[in-house]
Image (cartoon, grey):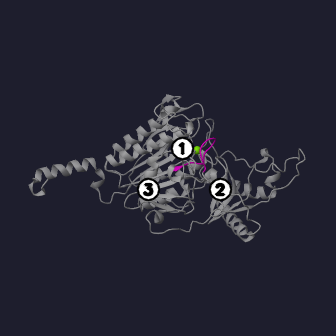
Amino acid sequence: MNSSRVSRRSFLRSCAAAAITAPHLLAADRPPNIVLILADDLGYGDLGCYGSKIETPACDRIAQEGMRFTDYYAASPLCSPSRAALLTGCYPPRTGVPRVLVPDDTYGLTAGIPTIGGTLQSRGYRAKCVGKWHVGTKPESHPLRQGFDEFYGIPFSHDMEPLSLIRNADVIEQSPKCETLTSRFTDQAVEFIRRADERPFFLYLAHTAPHIPLAPSTRFAKRSRLGAYGDVVSELDSGIGEVMKALDDSGHSRDTLVIVTSDNGPWYQGSTGPLHGRKGDNYEGGTRVPLLARMPGVIPQGTVSNQPSAAIDLLPTIAAITGSPIPAGLDGADLSPLLRGDRAQIDRGLLLYFDIYAIQCARLGKWKAHFSRWNANRWSDPPANGLRNLPLPRPELYDLESDPGESYNLAAQNSEVVADIRARVEAMLPSFSKDVAGAWYGTFNMPVEDTPEGARPRPRTP
Ligand code: MG
């Protein structure tokens, strides 16, 4: 159409229509929307862009159009503490959720603790949590009290009973069919995006897939050629594709930061790629998980970062990108210079790996020290069948650049590295509760090799 023939009235009409379909154009200083997608028990090797044979075109597209992280960690190898840390930017012992919650538990996310939702709500965001909450059901831990305007999802894992589907504060269904959860959560996410108004929005989409029970819908069952796990990951990826399409269709593709990650490594099925260990372990396979980030025009396309990073970094990073104040006292680091392509690395410092209150491992740069593993040493059980009682050496030290499978202990050749990491850990202990220091020194006073399972440090009721 020749622009000279457009009347003033039709021009204004077309502008009004554009504003309706693309409300983000109304305010030049409008901060970006945030879509944070959290898979449940998705392994490091379960996406095509991380080498999986499961076809995941939606996640692969996000990687191609954004940044893929090779050395990103969940904050725990288990669901609840990992999610609490992701939402708060703090290590699990600081969140009120140091271990996995079950329906009888009465504790949860600490009241008043800064969260991603609360931080963005203060900035004027419309916020919705969809999916698995699993960080507490007491009133002060509820999503509506932790920075979300809306909630649609389940309070615990879908392998726990009783299982309720909740909309905001109301139970709307008991024992929802697991086969329906991924599609229902996707529908809620898409509807929320399509309902965007002049305010920026924050969508926290916490899927239950591919955590067991593996329950693909009829549409995806037996379609992947990689069993039920492959079917469930395919359905998860398809749902992420629908979310991306909703962003495209609503004109919000370019002003939205999309993050895709997982809360811990895979459990009985799924792949850790080249990594050792699985869900529940503080070997890399338990905590190192995919992280994808896409924001066209901001995050350089098709980039890969090997920056050691973690879920505790998401709150300060999102705060920085949205121009929100970064809450004080966080454990996480601001990754926004990496995402913007301004820097290739940041000084991340020490990364800690917790088992409830026990610091089991610490990573510094390429080095990872294992100080304890509560159930790893069966050699020190009473000798049987002629086996000798051989205590295992601790700490262990692994070079994750050359040995991501944690197969070759280099502690004896690098005692100064072990001493440096140990000193850095102990310098951090006063900032934690006495439970953390007690677990640390208790471990050293009573070698873990000789610690019976029942004597493992246990949490006190918060
Ligand atoms: Mg999980």
Q: Is residue 242 left or right of residue 317?
A: left
Seen from the viewer's position, the closer of residues 123 and 304 is 304
Q: Is residue 255 left or right of residue 97?
A: left
Q: Is residue 270 magenta?
A: yes
The three-letter code of the residue at mark 3 reads Gln
For the record, the magenta segment spans 261-272
Q: Percent x, y for residue 169? A: 47, 36
Q: Which residue is the extreme one toward the bottom?
A: 416
Instruction: Please tell me which of labels 2 and 3 falls first in the chain.
Output: 3
Q: Is residue 212 magenta?
A: no
Seen from the viewer's position, the closer of residues 353 and 118 is 353
Q: Which mark is residue 420?
A: none
Q: Is residue 352 visible?
A: yes
Residue at left offset 81%, top offset 53%: 449
Secondary-structure class at tag 1 = helix
User: Dot 2: within a 10 Å radius of its alpha carbon, few (fewer than 14), some, or many (20 or more) residues?
Assistant: many
Name the dominant secondary structure of the magenta segment.
loop
The three-letter code of the residue at mark 1 reads Ser
Instruction: Please tell me which of labels 1 and 3 falls first in the chain.
Output: 3
Q: Would you name the residue on which mark 2 appears?
A: 353
Q: Quadrant of ligand 1?
A: top right
- The alpha-carbon separation of the residues under discs 1 and 2 comes to 24 Å
Q: Would you name the residue on which mark 3 appears?
A: 64
The three-letter code of the residue at mark 2 reads Tyr
- The alpha-carbon separation of the residues under discs 1 and 3 comes to 37 Å
Q: Is residue 92 visible?
A: no
Q: Would you name the residue on which mark 1 appears?
A: 141
- The alpha-carbon separation of the residues under discs 2 and 3 comes to 30 Å
Seen from the viewer's position, the closer of residues 176 and 124 is 176
Residue at left offset 48%, top offset 52%: 116
